[in-house]
Image (cartoon, rainbow, N blue to C red):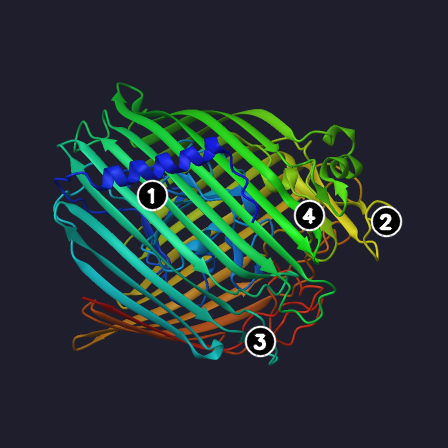
Amino acid sequence: MVKIFSVKFRTFRFLCVGLFLTISTCSWAQKLEPENSSEIVEMEKMEIQSSLKKIDLNTWVVHELPSKSPGNFTEKLAEIPGVDVNQRGAFSSEPMIRGLGFDRVSTSLNGLRLPNGSPTRTHAPMGQFGGTLYRSFQVVHYLPSLTLGPPVTGGWIDQKSQWTAPGSNVSKQPSQTSFGVDWFPDRNGRQWNAFNSGSLGPIGYRASLFRNQIGNYTSADNREVPSRHEDWGGSFSLAGNTGERLVHSIDTVFRKQFFTENVSLPLDVEDGNFWAITATHEFRRSEKSDDGNLQLRYGYTEADSTLSNERRDTRPILVSTETETQAFHADLRWKTIMPIMGDIEVGLDTNHEERLAIRQRGPVAKDFIWPDIQYEQAGIFAESLSQPINDTTLRIGLRWDRVRSEARMADQLAFGRSIESLYREYNGPSANKSSQQENALSANALLRWNPQKTITYYAGIGSSAQTPPPTERYRAFLNALGGGFELGNPSLKPERKWEVALGTEILSENLALRIDTYYFGVENYIWRQFVGTTAGILPVNPPQSVFSYRNVDTAFIGLELQGTWKVTPHFKVPFSVEWVDAQLRQSGTGFLKGDSLPELPPAEFRVSGIWDWKMKSVEANLEWAMRWVGSQSNELPAINPIYDQSDSYFLHDLYLTLKKSDLIVVKLGIRNLFDKLYSPYLTPPTSSIRPSSGDLNPGDKVPGAGQEFVASFTFKF
């Protein structure tokens, strides 16, 4: 693997590690407990329990993700209305929020942005947390707090260790140990995880380990679908105080990935590594509020992977790709309380990312897919949270970012041609550059009104800018889904999002209901389009299609609804609805104004019936879950051939849970109870190079899993 990172950037790494080690050897006087958030959406029970003191209605806080299906957290997060999954294979998936995915969704750990470790999107950040202690995720759909980091057009998935919180109990970290096993006999699969927390002298700690081994699944028409996957990893966290007001915490997470089969890609993941480490230091002026608190956070992460077609018998030539990413983050923020303006938070942050990917074709040829891409960002932000009149809360935020990106090896080759010349060839003379600098200004406001304790209304408006992601701007002849190649466009402009959101939340004795409606326009939306072929330009035989990126204007509109109806004290009905549409607001080559974007998720409706009862000392829970997914069509197959017509379908699941005093939990279930044959719309077709296992042929739709038995066992002591 070619090592790309400068001495300056490597110094960041050693400074970070040195600081972590120094802090970890301090004599800490107190142990901290994690914050007990009062606003949660528990995905397993689909209940809403919102604090009327907070304004983050735009945030879903997900606790204790259920073990209902094999997979990483991305698939499990998709139970939230507005969150969907884009897949390359069963374990190469990324979240979409309101129809926006890839780098438009930012995943962070204690402020550290986690980049995707591969240009093929097979090393998604959410895939790194398959069983760690990070069981709590904030999923922000819209108008995010501008203190989170540089804005993205989609949404945020924010993970925090939650050691530090105003007013939190600083008594001893409770001692707890748990061990869980998930069994999927139809896939010859098993997942296990272990967790332990407690105190080591003056230090509180949490630790976790996990291991996943999953085989292929069988569709309803008895075809074997490639989905083999194996990985292991874990996490470790420490926290304590120096003095009375200084709080410190250190978090690290790691994952080792083994062979993972990608049914929709011509390459499989042979090997992958990921680790991240973060530190938080907070000076608390007051234990009961944020007034005067000062916080410093920083972190570092690395990810690398090896992809290859070595195991595929029909490969025309042996191809392998080595990828590497590194990222550093730091932020400093100060919180205070001011008359009229209320709670104030101001600060600054910085991010530095570097990416390299080299493809080896045969024994000699090399292509730079990520040509040593560097991304640097620095930003300042300010946000206030006030109560202008009774029963209302107003949050106003402002942010400015300076971003620089560069492809430092754009003079290297892809298929024998310099990458710079290929940028010009397919994107025009304006793409004759390998570095860009941009300024981005963002602002938003969110008003919340509580006329009654059981009813909340909110309205928000905002504008944000996201600079073009490094992959869309600088990638160089990556193998494209559906055939052909993808090339970046250095002349892309930043996306500008204008957003309006309205909603309400109703909480009564027997009904919890939340309704979100939204509209947003995206100027300079970065969109993949067909731009030509390799004929006469590159030595590819036969000639293949070339796709690049252009800026277009789009408009999105959508609805999300989630609720729980408590029919009796022992029977409740959770339900949810989601729908989004997006249309082009201009005409261009191959499309017309009013055409719908092909990459949108279908409409979806979920409803469950949950009956609970008690048998002596054992609590029992029986759940029937139904999911309806609407039909979806691709109005622009010539421009984006990845997605095909998808029919609507119903899926039914059945689960039984037995719990003994929270010490032993047993879950048994049958997924796809009636063995329905279906193909998810957002899963691309089978790769043009036949997978090394299974029964699918190139170009086949990838069917979902047929009827499956699942079992989960959790022990706490």
Q: Nearer the viewer, residue 98 or 546?
A: 546
Mark toward the start of the polypeptide (4 vs 1): 4
Mark toward the start of the polypeptide (1 vs 2): 1
| Residue bearing mark 1 | 455
Where's residue 541, x and y in %? 83, 57
**Residue 191 falls in image quadrant:** bottom left
Q: Amino acid at mark 4?
A: Asp
Q: CA distance from mark 1 to mark 3?
A: 45 Å
**Residue 185 falls in image quadrant:** bottom left
Instruction: Using a 10 Å C-alpha cutoff, classify the residue at mark 1 as few (fewer than 14 neighbours), some (14 to 19) or many (20 or more).
Output: some
Looking at the rendered image, the disc whose residue lies closer to the viewer, 1 or 3, is 3
Q: Return the mark for residue 535.
A: 2
Q: Amino acid at mark 3?
A: Ser
| Residue bearing mark 3 | 219
Where's residue 389, x and y in %? 31, 25
- Left or right: residue 617 versus residue 306 is left
